[in-house]
Every structure is written in C-alpha cells, then in structure tokens.
Amino acid sequence: MSLNVRVITPDKVVWDAVAEEIILPSSTGQIGILTDHAPLLTALDIGVMRLKSESGWTSIVLMEGFAEVEENKVTILCNGAEEASTIDRSAAQEELERVTLLVDEATTKKEKIEATIELRKSKARLQAVA
C-alpha cells in the first residue's frame, strides 16, 4: 500500500506521485504519515517535507500551507514549494548570508517580521540540500 501525494501551489503542481512515507513540517512540529493514517487536516509551517519512495528519500521545501490526509491521499496546498534537487547549494548559502544581514539591519517591526520570514525560508532551502 502507498500514499498518493500531491503538492499544489497557486501556479503549479510541484509533486504528484506515490510515496511510502512522508514527514511534514506542521505548525506544531514534524508529523510522520504512513499508509492507513487517520484522517487529518493540519497547518504547515515553513520547512522541509521528506518523502520516501522506492527510489529513496526526496526533500521538498514548503512555504506554509495546509495538508489533508484521507484514505491514503495526501493533498498539500501551500504558498510555494521547491524540490531540493532544483536548489543550488552555494546560491542558497549566499542567500542565507544576505538575509541574515537584512534581519540585523531591520529597524521597524514590519521590516523585522518580513526579514525573519525570509530567514526561515532561506534556512529551510539550505536544510533541504544538506
């Protein structure tokens, strides 16, 4: 038995395949999903989703959203998603360094919040390729 997993963003379907197991970055911590999991609807945080298939583990960076698990179907709706295989490690490292400076330079509350969100995204991208 396997899970049918779909990752959908506003502009495209990022992933549509089967997996044996997935680990989701929910807003309350990581959640592991196996076949015949109880029905679930959960909010997702910025983080790395890991999928295990016959070919091994795949990582996908999720930029917040929701996941629904029902009858071995996992549907993930998120603001953005990116497969780790498409991320350039050195570019992700440079982005993290740039965004870290933005957090330090932020003066208003709005700037600090926006910079912190960008920092979390950058860390997730780097974690996915590690």
Image (cartoon, rainbow, N blue to C red):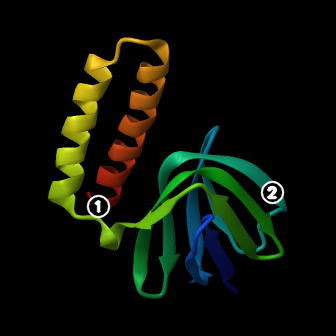
- The tag on residue 28 is none
Snapshot quadrant of residue 55:
bottom left
Snapshot quadrant of residue 107:
top left
**Between 26 and 125, the one nearer to me in the picture:** 125
**Between 126 and 34, the one nearer to me in the picture:** 126
Does dot 1 land on a helix, a strand or a loop?
Answer: helix
For the point 40% across and 38% down, the residue is 118
The answer to whether mark 2 and mark 1 are in CB contact below 8 A is no
Spatial separation of the CA atoms under disc 2 and disc 1 = 28 Å
Q: Does residue 33 appear to the left or right of 14 in the view shown?
A: right
For the point 21% across and 37% down, the residue is 98
| In the depicted structure, whether residue 87 falls above or below residue 24 | below
Q: Amino acid at mark 2?
A: Leu
| In the depicted structure, whether residue 24 falls above or below residue 12 | above
For the point 27% across and 19% down, the residue is 104
- The 10 Å Cα crowd at callout 1, few under 14, some 14 to 19, many 20 or more, is some
Residue 113 lies, in percent from the top left, at 47, 24
Does dot 2 land on a helix, a strand or a loop?
Answer: strand
| In the depicted structure, whether residue 13 falls above or below residue 108 | below
Residue under numbered circle 1: 129
Snapshot quadrant of residue 4:
bottom right
Residue 2 lies, in percent from the top left, at 67, 83
Q: Does residue 116 appear to the left or right of 38 in the view shown?
A: left
| In the depicted structure, whether residue 40 falls above or below residue 123 | below
Q: Does residue 52 appear to the left or right of 37 in the view shown?
A: left
Q: Nearer the viewer, mark 2 or mark 1?
A: 1
- The 10 Å Cα crowd at callout 2, few under 14, some 14 to 19, many 20 or more, is few
Residue under numbered circle 2: 40
Residue 127 lies, in percent from the top left, at 33, 51
Question: Nearer the N terminus, badge 2 or badge 1?
Answer: 2
Q: Does residue 119 appear to the left or right of 92 in the view shown?
A: right
Q: Amino acid at mark 1?
A: Val
